[in-house]
Image (tube, helix red, strand yellow):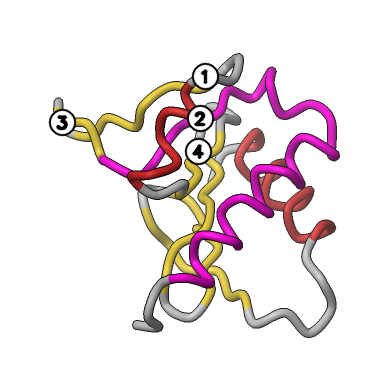
């Protein structure tokens, strides 16, 4: 895990609610944060954050500064965006992205 992704993971841990049912799992070369078997967010090597926003949340998420579609192997992953590290410098903003992912995952069936 890179220093940038480790730093971001530490900040995310600091924003989690005590007793919240979220675990970490290796995914995409980073530690993804998982709730009920569904990925919420994953800090990336470059300090950006992969965020699950759902297909319905894509347009709104992409309209925000520093946000792009997640591409893997030349294909766009629907329902996921990448938020640049620069856009995440404020813990309040990081918390908003975490809350957005939590709200979506609460609507998904557990895996």
- Mark 4–mark 1 Cα distance, whole angstroms, equals 21 Å
Query: The residue tagged with tag 3: helix, strand or loop?
Result: strand
Q: Is residue 100 left or right of residue 104?
A: right
On screen, 36 above or below 62?
Answer: below
Question: Crowdedness of circle 2 by 10 Å Cα count: few (<14), some, many (20+)?
Answer: few
Give the CA distance from mark 3 to mark 1: 20 Å
User: Which residue is located at x 60 percent, y 62 percent?
Assistant: 102
The residue indicated by pointer 2 is 60
Question: Dot 3 corresponds to which residue?
Answer: 75
Which residue has dot 1 on it? 63
Front-most of residues 23 and 103:
103
Task: Look at the numbered disc 1 and give the secondary structure of its residue.
Answer: loop
Q: Residue at x 65, y 37 (%)?
A: 3
Q: Is residue 20 left or right of residue 18?
A: left
How far, Cα to Cα, is label 2 from label 3?
20 Å
Which residues fall within the magenta stretch? 78-107
């Amino acid at each position: 895990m890179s220093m940038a992704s480790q730093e971001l993971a530490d900040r995310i841990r600091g924003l989690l609610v005590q007793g919240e049912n979220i675990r970490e799992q290796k995914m995409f070369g980073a530690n993804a944060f998982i709730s009920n078997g569904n990925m919420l967010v994953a800090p990336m090597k470059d300090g950006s954050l992969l965020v699950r926003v759902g297909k319905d949340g894509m347009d709104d998420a992409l309209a925000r500064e520093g946000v792009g579609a997640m591409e893997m192997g030349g294909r766009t992953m629907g329902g996921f965006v990448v938020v640049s590290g620069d856009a995440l410098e404020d813990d309040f903003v990081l918390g908003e992205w975490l809350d957005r992912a939590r709200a979506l995952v609460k609507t998904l069936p557990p895996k």
